[in-house]
Image (cartoon, rainbow, N blue to C red):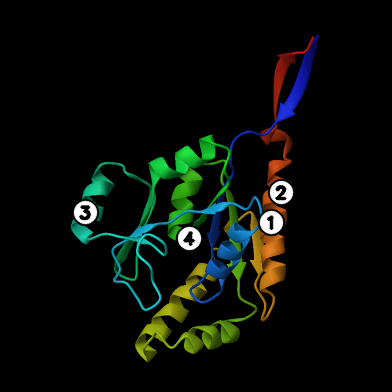
Amino acid sequence: MLQRKYTDNRGLLVVVSGPAGVGKGSICRELARTDGGPDVSISETTRPMRPGDEADVTYYFVDREKFESRISEDYYLEWARVYDNYYGTPRARIEEKLEAGTDVILEIDPQGAESIRKNFPSAVTVFIMPPSVTELRARITGRGSETEDQLVKRLSCAKDEIEQAPRYDYIIVNRENSLGRSVSELQAVITAEHLRTSRITAQDSRED
């Protein structure tokens, strides 16, 4: 007898963006630690390592010459130049994980997100929003890693990025002391997207 089974075998590509200091990295890492959680893609970058960075964990750190060479080889699923440094997502690693049924989160800026929309239209996009620009400034200042000029530049960029939020499929407001809630909301987005009719495929199998 033929039986029709409905399955969702392919992994989901989830783009997460938000201004520097909003907490998007913490949200993604916490979700990845949960049982059956998604993988968080590690980007390549030409920016210098900062205190607390780990090579091949925070980023794959490469020099500018190698990065630019890889751009010409179509090595990246997306890439962007941000704050005078390059950031890119290696294409092959992402495609392998999705084919294996693993959900993958890309933590990238709006410029990279736009490239993903064009090259990977089935991706789901999520913008992490601060409660206010004042709160965002306090968070960035609290890190103690920026000079005053760098802080002004980051806040200016943050305002430009926030204006891009309506282009995303979902918006999550990461409020003060609400990491757990934000993680749950991102998980809810992923769960809902896996249940979309368009993502479910019917397969016929024979059972005796």
Q: Earlier in the sequence, mark 3 or mark 2?
A: 3
Q: Which of marks 3 and 1 is nearer the N terminus?
A: 3
- Decide: marks 1, 4 in contact (CB < 8 A)? no
Distance between mark 1 and mark 2 Cα atoms: 6 Å
Q: Is mark 3 on a helix, strand or loop?
A: helix
Q: Residues within 10 Å of mark 4 (few under 14, many from 20)?
A: many
- Of the 4 image quadrants, the one containing the N terminus is top right
Give the residue pinned by disc 1. Answer: 187
Give the residue pinned by disc 3. Answer: 66
Q: Earlier in the sequence, mark 2 or mark 4?
A: 4
Q: In this rendering, would 107 be left or right of 63? A: right
Distance between mark 1 and mark 4 Cα atoms: 21 Å
Distance between mark 3 and mark 1 Cα atoms: 36 Å
**Which label sits in the foreground, 3 or 4?**
3
In the figure, residue 179 lies in which quadrant?
bottom right
Q: Earlier in the sequence, mark 3 or mark 4?
A: 3
Q: What element carries label 2?
A: helix
Please give the name of the residue rendered at 35% of the width and 76% of the height, measured from the top-left corner.
Answer: 50
Query: Hey, what amino acid is under mark 1?
Result: Gln
Q: How crowded is mark 3: few (under 14 residues within 10 Å), some or many (20 or more)?
A: few
Distance between mark 2 and mark 4 Cα atoms: 23 Å
- Decide: marks 3, 4 in contact (CB < 8 A)? no
- Decide: marks 3, 2 in contact (CB < 8 A)? no
Where 182 falls versus 154 (above or below)? above
- Find the residue positioned furthest to the left: 65
Give the residue pinned by disc 2. Answer: 191
Q: Position of residue 200 (x, y in %)?
A: 70, 32
Residue 110, numbered circle: 4
- Decide: marks 1, 2 in contact (CB < 8 A)? yes
